[in-house]
Image: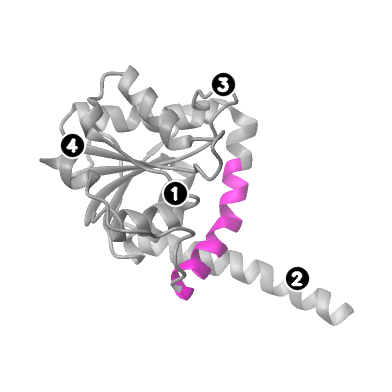
Amino acid sequence: MVAGVLAVGLLVPAALVGSGTWISRAARGHVYDLASVPPAPVALVLGAQVRPDGQPSEFLAARLDLARRLFEQGTVRALLVSGDHGQPEYDEPGAMRRWLLDHGVPDDKVVLDHAGFDTYDSCLRANRIFGVEQVIVVTQSFHIERAVAVCREVGLDAVGVGDDSVSRFERAWRWGSFRERFAGVKAVWDVNTRRDPVFLGPRETGVDDALR
């Protein structure tokens, strides 16, 4: 019993350090700010919480605003919004689309991925289902290195831009930053096991159409 507890006590810190090191190395040189990020055809906007009234949370709205600015300045030509729509009553990509349309992004430039249940699924589906090869990933800054690392590992030529405007929500920001350390361990597991996403399905042409 004691030996088992000691083993876990040693393995968990090692996994945290190892995954953090891998993420930092994989993302190094591929994270930018809004002004300096190189252009790409598509921005991949990762989903986050949607409120019961269907409105994006502050964290998700901040991601969407960053993506809108990338589109308006011509850095990207289409937005792929990827999130959780596993239940009919909860629809992250639908809320993301509505927000972008309400803020001036043309409908034909917004593509929905309804099965982006986590970062790995969103990145892999962007490549395998939507045919994306080059992308700017958009999320919060505490998440951006992991998102870029995972996307690059599954075959995307990915760079990233992170939002830190919502760091004013200190408690939520600290929780997200803490959680990120453990999410990194899962990311290493995902990319090494090469698991399939929760849903695959046929090739979709939405991104191709948006780029025409």
Report which residue position mark 2 lands on.
9
**Residues marked 3 and 2 touching at CB (< 8 Å):** no
Q: Nearer the viewer, mark 2 or mark 4?
A: 4
**At numbered mark 3, what does the secondary structure look like: helix, strand or loop?**
loop
Of callouts 4 and 1, which one flags the residue occurring earlier in the amino acid sequence?
A: 4
Q: Nearer the viewer, mark 3 or mark 2?
A: 3
> What residue do we see at 25% from left, 27% from top?
107
Q: Is residue 32 left or right of residue 145?
A: left
> Residue 60 location, x and y as percent?
47, 32
Q: CA distance from mark 2 to mark 4?
A: 46 Å
Dot 3 alpha-carbon crowd within 10 angstroms: few under 14, some 14 to 19, many 20 or more: few
> What residue do we see at 27% from left, 27% from top?
69
Check residue 116 in the rendering and tell me which mark sits there, or answer none: 1
Of callouts 3 and 1, which one flags the residue occurring earlier in the amino acid sequence?
A: 3
Check residue 53 in the rendering and tell me which mark sits there, or answer none: 3
**Three-letter code for the amino acid on which mark 4 is drawn:** Thr
Report which residue position mark 4 lands on.
75
Dot 2 alpha-carbon crowd within 10 angstroms: few under 14, some 14 to 19, many 20 or more: few
Q: Nearer the viewer, mark 4 or mark 1?
A: 1
Q: CA distance from mark 3 to mark 1?
A: 21 Å
Span shown in magenta: 176-193
Q: Nearer the viewer, mark 3 or mark 4?
A: 3
Check residue 130 in the rendering and tell me which mark sits there, or answer none: none
Of callouts 2 and 4, which one flags the residue occurring earlier in the amino acid sequence?
A: 2
